[in-house]
Amino acid sequence: MPNWINVEGNDNAQLMLVGEAPGKHEDENGIPFCGPSGELVNEMLREVGTSRNSVYVTNVVKLRPPDNDISRLNELGKKISDFEPILWNEIATIQPNAILALGDTALKTLTGKTGITKYRGSILTSNLGYPKVIPTFHPANLLGHHGEGMFKWRAKVTITLDFKRAREQSEFKEFCLPKRTLWICKDSLSLLRYLERNRDYESFTVDIETFKAMPLCIGLSFHKGEAVSVPLLDFPHDGKGTSYDELAHIWKLI
Ligand code: URA
């Protein structure tokens, strides 16, 4: 039977990190995230302006599954749900403002949601309504044969941004989503006003959606509080769509 892995961290932590289950190094040392995944976690914590000593680190499952394969936990006569009461107890004791959920198992256990790719970076509520949960990819994805080069670099940037968001969210208890306006521009006058309103910005973000190399719509944003999506091929049909005149104006403005 593998060793029971204790938790580690600051009892007054405002941020709690929840991983999946201990690996080889954790099993040998009795400390969560003390191997290569732990080094990455520590580095990212430093990068976002906090440290391992300021946070509380734990795992959903407290025993190392055979071959680090969570689907083989049953070989130890255990299920993930056996460990849930322990985790909720830790949360009730520490009362963090925010939890950074590392990977799918932590996301599912804490929020009931599945699909880390879809939910990463979101500010969610836990199954109990409190505390906030910010999921991200498990840093172990950056290790070993899990992708190389560009993929790893992008994944690391993404995970670090999620760490940053979790650190910021851990500064307060309240659940308040960032205020954002996203709108669809259907006429050239609204687009003109939007561009005029933002004319002092020196840079902007652009995202072009295409189908078979044809631009379908373009998204623009000058700052994170507002973004507009401009349909480019919304031809008039059955009394709907944008008139050809309007489309021509929109294209010229873009
Ligand atoms: N991966 C985890 O999810 N937890 C650890 O403690 C180490 C690696």
Image: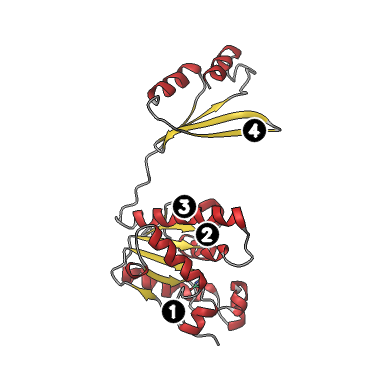
Across and down, in percent, residue 104 comes to 54, 62
Label 3: state its secondary structure.
loop
Residue reaching furthest to the top: 245
- Disc 3 versus disc 4: distance between alpha carbons? 26 Å
Cβ at disc 1 under 8 Å from ligand 1: yes
- Please tell me which of labels 3 and 2 falls first in the chain: 3
Residue type at mark 3: give it: Gly
214 w.r.t. 120: above or below: above
Q: Which residue is mark 1?
A: 31
- Please tell me which of labels 1 and 2 falls first in the chain: 1
Q: Which residue is mark 4?
A: 210
Residue type at mark 2: give it: Phe
Viewer-closest of 35 and 86: 35
Cβ at disc 2 under 8 Å from ligand 1: no
| Residue drawn at point x = 33 percent, y = 64 percent | 96
Label 2: state its secondary structure.
loop
Residue type at mark 4: give it: Thr
Query: How many numbered circles does the render carry?
Result: 4
Residue type at mark 1: give it: Ile
Viewer-closest of 130 and 12: 12
Cβ at disc 4 under 8 Å from ligand 1: no
